[in-house]
Image (tube, rainbow, N blue to C red):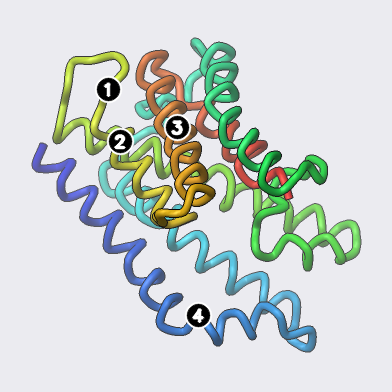
Amino acid sequence: MKTAKQDLLIIFISALIPMVIYFLFEPQWRLFNQDPAMNFAVKFTVQSLLSFSLAGLGFSIVMLLRREKFSAYGLVTINMIPAITLSVLSFVPHLLFLIFTKGFHGYAPMSGAIIYDSVMSRPTLQRVICMAIIFLIWGFCEGFTYVYASQKINEILPIKNKFINFGAIICGVLCIMMHGGISLNPVSMSDALTMFIFVYGILIVKDNFDNAWGCIFSFLFLWNAFP
């Protein structure tokens, strides 16, 4: 338990520092992203490093320090198909919310990433390389961070119930706070609820099947895929 608390502290600090920097200089970041004169390589590198600091740096540090393996967190082949299938079903409420509130404008994985439009305007080779990095950071790292944090939280706050665990609850709330926030108007509340169902669902599936590929698949191909 003590080790898990230390690990979560490292993850929290690793994400908090870039998050504070981002919010302190948010207007400058927006101008930086929108400036057509800014060199694309510089813009893409800065955005990638910032996103990795938020979504991947923490668990990378801890896993290296503890010499942990991805397989210990459910990245295994057993039960992969049912885990992916049920995780996709967990996304359905949020997908319906997006369709009813914004309409359906096609399917484009990672189109929600900040740098996506700039990447798609680049030559083919650059586009392929940059999209691979986007899938790694905005997809794999973000999805695995929820898996990793949830498992650490459940080591600290264990509960013997197949459908309730504190890790999934806390990560669901964190997702709402980071991506949508909480407001009392019906649309925002529906957004928050369906977002929570999605994150809570994929983490419950992961814990029940001991397989995290459903979480990873969801963030790679669903989370940012509906512009």
**Which label is found at residue 164?**
1
Q: Earlier in the sequence, mark 4 or mark 1?
A: 4
Q: Quadrant of the N terminus?
A: top left
**140 or 35, which is in the foreground?**
35
**Left or right of residue 109: residue 217:** left
Per the image, the residue denoted by label 4 is 26
Where disc 3 sits, the SS reads helix
- Mark 3 surroundings: few (<14), some (14-19) or many (≥20) residues within 10 A: many
Residue sitting at the far left: 2
Residue 169 bears which disc, if any? 2
Indicate the position of residue 208 as horizontal and vertical percent values. 37, 14
Specify the amino acid type for callout 4.
Answer: Glu
**Which residue shows up at 44% across the image and 63% down it?**
53
Label 3, on which residue?
Answer: 197
> Of helix, strand and loop, which one carries label 1?
loop
Quadrant housing residue 34: bottom right
Q: From this view, report whether residue 107 is shown above or below residue 176.
A: above
Three-letter code, disc 3? Ile
